[in-house]
Amino acid sequence: MSLYEPPSTRPSRLGVTLETYILEGMLGQPHATGAFTSLLNQLAFAAKLVASKVRRAGLANALGYTGATNVQGEAVQKLDEDANQTILRVLGRRHHCAAAATEEEEHVRVLSEHPSSKYLVVFDPLDGSSNIDVNISIGTIFGVLHRYPEGKREERAPTEEDFLRPGRELLAAGYVIYGSSTMLVLASGEGVHGFTYDPTVGEFFLSHENIRVPPRGDSYAINEGNADLWDAPTRDWVASLKRPNSEGKRGRTMRWVGTLVADAHRTLLRGGVFAYPADAQNRDGRLRLLYEANPFAFLFEAAGGAATTGQGRVLDVVPERLHQRVPLVLGSRLDVEEYQRFVERGG
């Protein structure tokens, strides 16, 4: 389902609420039932609840660790668990979401077996949890799939296998960044659009319409603390980014926050490249395919950018496991293509 008209034929709607924007898109679809629209509004409502908890975290004894370890082998922060349960509770209403897969839980959570439950949701409830206690931007990442692959309707409860589909089958993807302001960025159908939250009225308003990634940027984001673990092509590529150009001007500027949502958000708006390649300790990559790589690859491609694992397009990877990890390089199309050339020629 496509929510949006092509940007070239659409009058500007800056300032409208997210709910209105989504509803207007639904009204333009002759066969729309409203279920998809309602599901997106549920995700937006969940984001408001999480944003409220993030803003009050230091006052509500919500900082620090729970003492538990999640399926990724990571210590669970209190806000991680709180955000995870909040999103699951919201998605469990209205019977639009049949099941959800979350980075925090080992197995798929079935939320509804009602025949009208047509969608699956994958999400990372709070990306960048290691930065929570030091007040650095964190975020929520999500993707929406149709419950029935290729229209194959089966009267059964959703299973893990239903989630093991390439990212190109996503119907929508987005993220919420909790920083100096709270912003929800959504891709569904035509275009990528950003909505900024106004807590005084409790609404997301369209603030960034039809976001496009610049073809090339002047910065790169990578954890250079891993440099000794990289392969030769990656080291050579990063070295090339630092070299002065033919006119003697300095090379690219390195920017690294350490939260995927924050680094990717900057790259989406300003261009450049974000990279978390495979290394000697993480030969399959570090980021999760379903919850992180696929949603961002979907967003960047919709905004005119690109995303690769180094071996090919991220959205073409067929998942084998629910919590599968992959290398991820995304950003401006020309910058990603340049990285790919280094990989292909071995440096």
Image (cartoon, grey):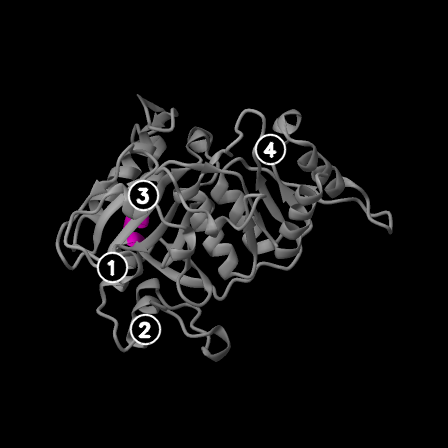
Q: Is residue 294 left or right of residue 42?
A: right
- Residue at image mark 3: 50
Q: Position of residue 289 (x, y in %)?
A: 43, 42
The tag on residue 152 is 1
Quarter location, residue 250 = top right
- Given contact means CB atoms under 8 Å apart, are the residues at marks 3 and 2 in contact? no
Q: Quarter of the image for the C terminus: give it.
A: top right
Q: Is residue 226 magenta?
A: no
Q: In this view, which residue lies farthest toward the left? A: 114
Q: Is residue 199 visible?
A: no
Majority secondary structure in the magenta region: helix
Q: Give the magenta-colored segment's residue range.
A: 43-48
Find the distance from the CA under tag 2 to the CA under tag 1: 29 Å
Q: Nearer the viewer, mark 1 or mark 3?
A: 1
Q: Which residue is mark 4?
A: 223
Comes first in the chain, label 2 or label 4? 2
Q: Which residue is mark 2?
A: 24
- Can you say whether 116 is above or below 122 in the image? below
Please provide percent x and percent y for residue 124.
Answer: 37, 41
Q: Circles 2 and 4: CB distance less than 8 Å?
A: no
Mark 3 against mark 4, which lies toward the viewer?
A: 4
Q: Is residue 128 left or right of residue 102?
A: right
What kind of element bears circle 4?
A: loop
